Every structure is written in structure tokens, then in C-alpha cells.
Image (cartoon, helix red, strand yellow):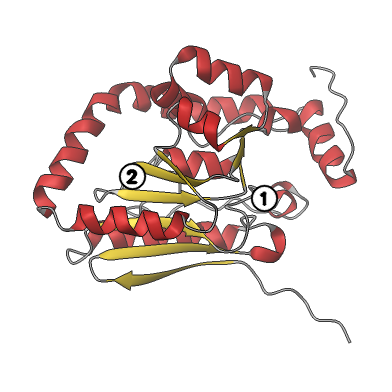
Amino acid sequence: MTHEAPAGRVRHERLGHVLKITIDNVTRRNSFIPEMMEELSEALTLLDEDPELRAGVLCAEGGHFTAGLDMPKFFGPGATARTTPEGQVDAFQLTKTCRKPIVAAVQGITYTIGIEMVLACDIVVAADDARFCQMEAKRGLAPLAGGNFRFLTRMGWGDAMYHLLLVDEFGAAEAHRIGLVQEVVPAGSQVERALELAEIIAKNAPIGIQITKLTARKFYEAAEATAIAALPDIRAAVMGTEDMKEGMQSFIERRPAVFTGR
């Protein structure tokens, strides 16, 4: 008798004025399926709209934050594109941002969309075993959810290009050095520390905190709007190329990709 692994989900719970949002697809290294994107959007929208909630924590079960997308579910035969319903906060906060502060807690593998989700948060706590890689270019793709331009705002041109173009994996210490994360803590304590920070934030005046975040966001809005508007063209430039097909096939076959630039 065979037993199918449970489907992944994103669940949330209220802890006073803090909303804890948890990625839970442990058997697949917390890879995202389309339904999980919808659940994350719903949780972020709840955080944004509920006046009793003052801060959020985004974290994950198990030993890893997320390995990224479950690629066949998004790009394989029969996959259908899903869009965030109008008015909801999207998973990467590109179409609508959350007004409340969000603290991310990451551990283990934090790849591709995991980094892009972290870059949409305000403060990041990393376990000392965290490993990061914006690896889309190794699969014939490119960062399509804000990683390219938000690397620049967090790290500056040199460090951003170093990691985006080398497509390398780097650890928590390097992530702290370049500003991707704000604290590094022993593995296993990252969620507790993120909750502590969120609770400290939640004790401050809610309107003052939200206005502080809003005015800081205004500084980046014009540049981000230009970059976000370019994302459909970037997506069109990589989707359907021979390199993308090779990247997907090599991923499925677990072998190095051979790219041709076509």
C-alpha cells in the first residue's frame, strides 16, 4: 500500500498582534506549488488589512526555507498561470505591498523565489546554516519576482552583480555582510528570534510604524515601478527559449545543463 505525501500548504496563526505565516511542504524542501502561492497571498492580505495585526513573521517548517518553485507544476505540460486576485497582496509584493512590517526567518536552502520573498520583507533573521542562491540563470530563466532589482537596493551594484552573475551559493555570513539578512543566529532559534523582533515592533505605535515603512517605501517606488513594468518583457524574453527547455530538462534529469544562447 502506498501513501502519497501530503500536499504543501502555507498556514498562518495569530499570536497576539503578530501573524505567523509558515511555509509547510517539508517532504519537498518546502518547494512552492500554485496553491501555496495563493495561500501566502491570502495570509499577507490578512496581515495588511486586519487592524488588530501589527507585524508579521514569515518562516518555514523543517530544515529548509524553500528550494523554490516545484518547476513542473508551474512550467510543465498542463501547467496554468495563476494571478493574484485584484486587491490582494501578492507573494512577492510587486503589485501590492503589505503596510505592516514583516520579519522573515530563514534556514537551510533559501533559493530563487525564497530570496525574492525575503527581499519583499523588512527584516531578515537567518539561521547560521542558511544557504542562498538566485539560481534561475542555471535553468535558462532569469529572476522574475523582484530578485534582480531588489538585490541592488539591499546590496549595491557590485555585490548584487557578483552573486546574480556568478549564480553562486553563499552562506549566512556572506548574506549578513552584503545586507541581505540583518541577524545570524544558531540554527533552530531563527523563528523564535523573528517572533521576538515582531513583538517588539508590535508594541510600538501602529500608525507611526506603518507611516515609517510607507515613507521608506516611497524612496524606492519610482525605480521599482519601472523595473516591475519591465518584468513581462523579461519573462517573454526567456520563456520558450531553447535554453529554458534545456534548463528544465536538465533539472528533471538531474544533470548539468548545456546552454546554447538560443
Q: Is residue 253 left or right of residue 235?
A: right
Alpha carbon distance from label 1 to label 2: 22 Å
Q: Is residue 196 left or right of residue 107?
A: left
Where on the picture, by quarter, is residue 253? top right
Where on the picture, by quarter, is residue 194? bottom left
What amino acid is found at the position of numbered circle 2 in the picture?
Answer: Lys
The N terminus - image quarter: bottom right
**Rendering coords of residue 254 (x, y %):** 87, 43
Q: Which mark is residue 96?
A: 2
Query: Looking at the image, which residue sits at the far front?
Result: 186
Where on the picture, by quarter, is residue 4? bottom right
Could you say which is closer to the camera, residue 182 or residue 261? 182
Q: Is residue 233 visible?
A: yes
Could you say which is closer to the camera, residue 58 or residue 144? 58
**Rendering coords of residue 190 (x, y %):** 46, 54
Which of the two labelled residues, at mark 1 and mark 2, occupies the earlier sequence position? 1
Helix, strand or loop at disc 1?
A: helix
Helix, strand or loop at disc 2?
A: loop
The C terminus - image quarter: top right
Q: Which mark is residue 74?
A: 1
**Rendering coords of residue 205 (x, y %):** 9, 53
Q: Residue at x 31, y 58 (%)?
A: 196
Q: Residue at x 48, y 63 (%)?
A: 22
How many numbered marks, from 0 up? Answer: 2
What amino acid is found at the position of numbered circle 1 in the picture?
Answer: Phe
Q: Residue at x 73, y 73 (%)?
A: 5
Q: Which mark is residue 9?
A: none
Mark 2 packing: few (<14 Cα in 10 Å), some, or many (20+)?
some
Q: Is residue 90 visible?
A: no
Query: Looking at the image, which residue sits at the far top?
Result: 158
Vertical comparison of 206 with 220: above or below: below
